[in-house]
Image (spheres, rainbow, N blue to C red):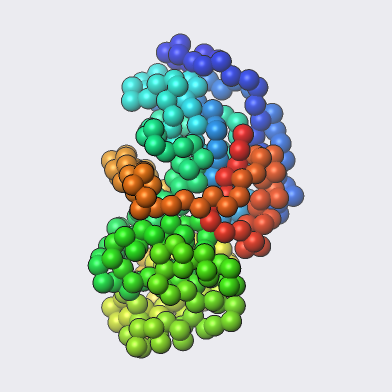
């Protein structure tokens, strides 16, 4: 493989897992890829580990726009070693251990990517850990600082507490001094959430989370609600926020919340925001500082990363099916 600067690492032929067209997990299939020559400003990464996230399912099903007509390589976070460097890239070199989060392209043995979206990994952070937390951990970073600045004494409701983002959020929020309430489905997931920072966990399979939040807050509601579930929860999430409280909708695993009207916020003069991670990671300074802070939290034990499933890249269709059915907890990592 050659690059604009003539710097490269020998690589084998590789493959990617692509969605032939929008649809179910069955549209995912293997495609062969050869040498990739990085354009100016790009690097080529040889993946060692790849994260799996709900946004991959949103994109696969067509809930989000496709940038190509067919054979879209899915995947939004990964970690590995730089195999080639394009012209103009000065902050990274062949052989560097790196990680990134960016929509599409990660389900592959190797890929080209804009070098400004890549961060170097500290020695203390293994590639599988990095692949598990780049999207999920940086999501928690912006949720707790930019969407709503959580402080000591705040009371927080976080849905999907036993998921990959939720388990990191429980620990992160606890380190900020918040009182953390979570929702999860079933006794096993509730126990897992409690072991990861949550003070109270509501089992949505047997309890009404709105009623439970009101009991836990003496009717006042929480300072902020973080909702990535969407249609199944948003109407009640709005009712869980205190007067002048904030509701952050950052996903739609149960589908988009279609019944919202702006007047719904009048219930408590509420603030509502719908952020997306990639609006933040496109800011290089934020990406570097937030990543460094996140890696430091992992290194010092503030964050314990729960990788509860590892699977070969070629089995990603099965992984999608399990994730969509809410059969997983914590983080899932694909191995190459």
In this rendering, is residue 235 above or below 296?
below
**Viewed as shown, does residue 315 lie left or right of 290?**
right
The residue most toward the top is 6
Whether residue 69 can be seen here: no
In this rendering, is residue 169 above or below 53?
below
Q: Residue at (61%, 58%) from the top-left corner?
A: 328
Whether residue 146 can be seen here: yes
Frontmost residue, 32 versus 96: 96
Q: Residue at (39%, 83%) from the top-left corner?
A: 216
Q: Quadrant of the C terminus?
A: top right
Q: Where is residue 287 in the image (x, y as percent from the top left)?
A: 34, 43
Q: Residue at (63%, 20%) from the top-left corner?
A: 12
Q: Quadrant of residue 185?
A: bottom right
Q: Quadrant of the N terminus?
A: top right
Total numbered labels placed on residues in the image: 0
Q: In which quarter of the image is residue 19?
A: top right
Frontmost residue, 235 versus 187: 187
Q: Residue at (39%, 37%) from the top-left corner?
A: 124
Frontmost residue, 265 versus 284: 284
In this rendering, is residue 97 above or below 199?
above
**Viewed as shown, does residue 46 lie left or right of 72?**
left
The residue most toward the right is 26
Q: Position of residue 77 (x, y in %)?
A: 50, 42
Q: Position of residue 211 (x, y in %)?
A: 46, 86
Q: Where is residue 34 in the image (x, y as percent from the top left)?
A: 64, 22
The residue most toward the left is 152
């Amino acid at each position: 493989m050659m690059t604009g600067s003539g710097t490269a690492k020998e690589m084998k032929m590789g493959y990617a897992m692509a969605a032939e067209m929008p649809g179910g997990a069955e549209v995912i299939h293997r495609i062969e890829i050869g040498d990739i020559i990085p354009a100016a400003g790009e690097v080529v990464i040889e993946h060692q580990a790849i994260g799996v996230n709900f946004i991959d399912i949103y994109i696969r099903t067509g809930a989000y726009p496709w940038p190509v007509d067919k054979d879209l390589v899915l995947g939004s976070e990964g970690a590995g070693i730089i195999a080639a460097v394009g012209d103009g890239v000065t902050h990274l070199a062949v052989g560097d251990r790196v990680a990134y989060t960016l929509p599409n392209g990660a389900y592959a043995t190797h890929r080209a990517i804009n070098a400004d979206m890549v961060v170097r990994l500290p020695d203390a952070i293994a590639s599988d850990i990095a692949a598990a937390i780049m999207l999920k951990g940086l999501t928690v970073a912006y949720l707790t600082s930019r969407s709503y600045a959580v402080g000591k004494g705040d009371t927080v409701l976080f849905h999907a507490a036993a998921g990959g983002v939720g388990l990191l959020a429980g620990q992160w929020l606890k380190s900020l001094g918040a009182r953390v309430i979570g929702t999860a489905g079933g006794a096993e997931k509730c126990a897992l959430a409690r072991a990861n920072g949550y003070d109270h966990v509501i089992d949505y399979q047997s309890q009404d989370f709105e009623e439970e939040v009101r009991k836990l807050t003496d009717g006042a509601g929480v300072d902020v609600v973080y909702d990535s579930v969407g249609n199944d929860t948003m109407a009640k999430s709005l009712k869980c926020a205190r007067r002048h409280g904030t509701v952050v909708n950052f996903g739609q695993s149960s589908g988009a919340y279609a019944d919202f009207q702006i007047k719904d916020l009048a219930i408590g003069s509420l603030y509502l925001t719908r952020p997306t991670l990639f609006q933040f990671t496109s800011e290089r300074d934020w990406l570097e500082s937030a990543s460094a802070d996140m890696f430091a939290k992992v290194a010092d034990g503030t964050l314990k990363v729960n990788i509860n499933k590892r699977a070969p890249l070629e089995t990603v269709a099965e992984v999608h099916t399990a994730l969509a059915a809410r059969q997983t907890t914590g983080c899932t990592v694909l191995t190459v």
